[in-house]
Image: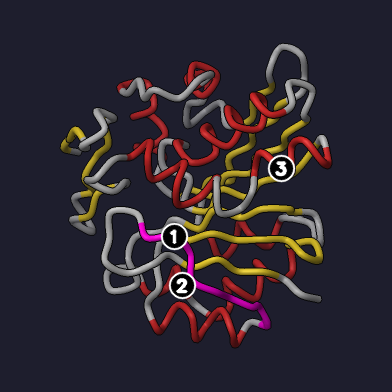
Amino acid sequence: MEKIQTRDGSETFVNPKFNESYHSFTGAVEEATEKYCKPTKIAEIARERGEFTLLDFAFGMGYNSAMAIAIAKEANPDCKINVIGIENDPLIIEKIQEVNPKIPGYEFYKQLTPKNLCIKSEDNSITLKILLGDAKDTIQTIQSNTVDVVFYDSFSPKTQPEMWSIFLFQEVHRVLKQKGILATYSCARLVRDNIKAAGLTYADGPKVGRRGPGTIVWKEN
């Protein structure tokens, strides 16, 4: 995999199979903050609830969920956070050792390897488990109504349409708690049609480094 530097100085990789990078060229850390953490109100959830479960769909190197942990802990140091990562490529897990993004606490993620996919912080306030394998199978192992927030960051619908299927959004609907929220960078018609078909509600998300907005999704009932 080729390593590249994004505009905010953070590093990412280009996946040779799909010829797409794991993060936006405009800034990998900026993307995690502006496209995922802020729209899903991670800081507010940490302060008001004091705990949450985050599903990091298409985990990659974990920038999105690592930033969520950093923001949550800044808002409420006592917040308890459970992260579930869905990823099918063990190689990108290995690449965590080769990057050092400016995300507070990212060193915690350095404990992850393809053979060590479940880690806890020293104070047990943070748990992280990677479900390695085909997303259609691994998401079905998550209990219903247990997830507060989903970060949905698969490769684009043009190159990986199977990762934006009605079935997977139906599974997201199943695992989300009522009023649970999802953020994704895509506003593609296929994506939004499948979100709606799965019984979820959507609206425009922020524009960050792209002409089009992202998409914010809720589970109303």
Mark 2 or mark 1: whose residue is earlier in sequence: 2
Q: Above or below — where is 29 with respect to 212?
A: above
Q: Is residue 142 left or right of residue 114?
A: right
Looking at the rendered image, the disc whose residue lies closer to the viewer, 2 or 3, is: 3
Residue sitting farthest toward the top? 122
For the residue pair 11 and 109, the one nearer the viewer reads as 11
Q: Is residue 122 left or right of residue 97?
A: right
For the C terminus, which image quadrant?
Answer: bottom right
Amino acid of disc 3: Glu
Q: Above or below — where is 80 with respect to 110?
A: below
For the N terminus, which image quadrant?
Answer: top left
The secondary element bearing badge 3 is classed as helix
* Image-quadrant location for residue 150: bottom right
- Residue 121 percent coordinates (x, y): 68, 18
| Image point (64%, 48%), residue name | 41
Amino acid of disc 2: Trp
Q: Which residue in the protein does label 2 denote?
A: 164
Q: Above or below — where is 36 with respect to 18?
A: above
Mark identifier at residue 44: 3
- Residue 174 percent coordinates (x, y): 74, 69
Looking at the rendered image, the disc whose residue lies closer to the viewer, 2 or 1, is: 1
Magenta range: 199-207
Q: Could you tell me how far apart the alpha carbons at marks 2 and 1 are, in whole angstroms?
A: 20 Å
For the residue pair 137 and 128, the one nearer the viewer reads as 128
Mark 1 or mark 3: whose residue is earlier in sequence: 3
* Image-quadrant location for residue 127: top right
Count residues near mark 3 (Cα–Cα under 10 Å), then give few for <14, some for 14-19, many for 20+.
some
| Image point (28%, 48%), residue name | 24
Q: Could you tell me how far apart the alpha carbons at marks 1 and 3 are, in whole angstroms?
A: 18 Å
| Image point (57%, 71%), residue name | 168
Q: Which residue in the protein does label 1 denote?
A: 206
